[in-house]
Amino acid sequence: MNLLMVSGDRQVVLGERGPFHSMQREFSRYFERIDVLCPKPTGPVTIRSIHDNVHVLPADCGRLAMLRWIARRGAELIEEHGHTLIVSHDYGFFYNGLGSAQLSRTTGVPYLSEIHHVPGYPVAIGLRERFDRWVARAYLRWARHRAIGFRVVNQQQMPRLMTGWGVAPEKIFILPSLYIDLEVFRPAPSPVEAVYDVCFVGRLVENKGADRILESLRVLASQGMPTRSVFVGKGPLADKLQRQAQAHGLDVTWIPWVDTPSDLAEIYRQSRVCVCASTCEGGPRFTVEAMACGTPVVSTPVGVMGDLLADGRAGRLGGFEPWGFARSLEEVLRDESIRVEMGRNAAEIARQHEYATAIGVYANGLRLMAGEAPLELEPVS
């Protein structure tokens, strides 16, 4: 089976080995050939081949001409290689999906639309996210009659939204996108003394809610529960957040970047709880990495976290406002024995997202949609 993917990820053509490169190491074993169309990079336009059978082809045009380029270049590839499924990663102004739909119509090859999350859902921050949510609704209502189906990555949040927007339930396919390397992200072999009470990892941008995390920590401090925290990440709000922490007298360590996943895993293991206060997410990945390291999580009910934390065994779901989030944090931090038990449960729950298993579920799901038999592959040593 040959697969055509329409992606927004340009890391491979820029020579970077990010999550897409890592995913393709296992994913590519399920297909004879994968061609990936992606936006034009900054710099020379060069086709890159990885893992022997994955070929990443950057556009030779700007974003305004992407729809036409996807339809034209995709048709050339399908004629040459005979792909049996088009997979479109859709977001923003949805030119990937619009181009894939046109390509599907002209070639007869079905296309699957992947929507990991919708900006502004479940909570919109500002007019831009409200506009983005309106655009997503318009695309879904248009694509529901054209796509073979829609891939989502969580069990509750996106299916609920899509059915409310008129997508038939039988067209929604739940194929999680989280895959965790359990050789790296795993509990310590022996108990580790906590360096931090609270850990956050992510871009310091508005929808990640880092300011609300700091406000929640201020609430805890006012109630006699001061915390030591670590924020790993960088972004346009870094200076503002650091001033906020200083003004509240909070003990926060700021780490803009870590060199390796192993370094990040060590921070998770040194933390008593990992937090996410996002207003919209597809994953998030970092919370599940922390869970795999035996660290419980407090998160807003975004993305997959609503699925993983609903029963309270591995942490708590918190509200979108600081007082409610602080209350959930306090529930996890106040009793160390309960927190440790949550950490053990978190590591067990995270095992369902083991790298090879999770990617195999995704790849075989695509094979079934294309009318191909699933494959059972031996693990790579």
Image (cartoon, rainbow, N blue to C red):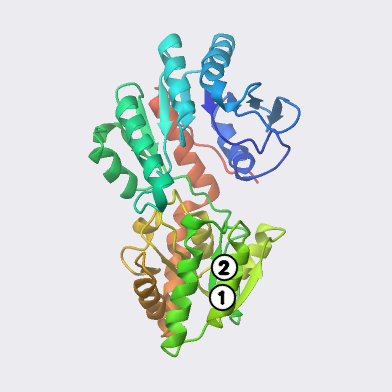
Whether residue 232 is visible, yes or no, is: no
Residue 337 picture quarter: bottom left
Q: Amino acid at mark 1?
A: Ala
Rendered image quadrant of residue 19: top right
Q: Residues within 10 Å of mark 1 (few under 14, many from 20)?
A: some
Badge 1 element: helix
What residue sits 44% from the left and 23% below the top? 98
Above or below, comparing residue 114 to residue 351 in the picture:
above
Residue at 67%, 36% (x, y): give it. 12
In this view, 25 is above or below 223: above
**Residue 62, position in %: x, y?**
61, 25
Observer-nearest residue: 323 or 363? 323
- In three-dimensional space, the C-alpha distance between marks 2 and 1, rounded to whole angstroms, equals 6 Å
**Residue 226: x, y in percent?**
50, 86
Q: Quadrant of residue 326?
A: bottom left
Q: Which residue is mark 1?
A: 245
Residue 331 drawn at (x, y percent) = 37, 79
Residue at numbered disc 2:
241
Q: Going by the image, does 222 lie left or right of 27?
A: left
Crowd class of label 2 (few under 14; some 14 to 19; many from 20; radius 10 Å): some
Please name the amino acid that badge 2 sits on: Leu
Give the residue at x 71% y 28%. 48
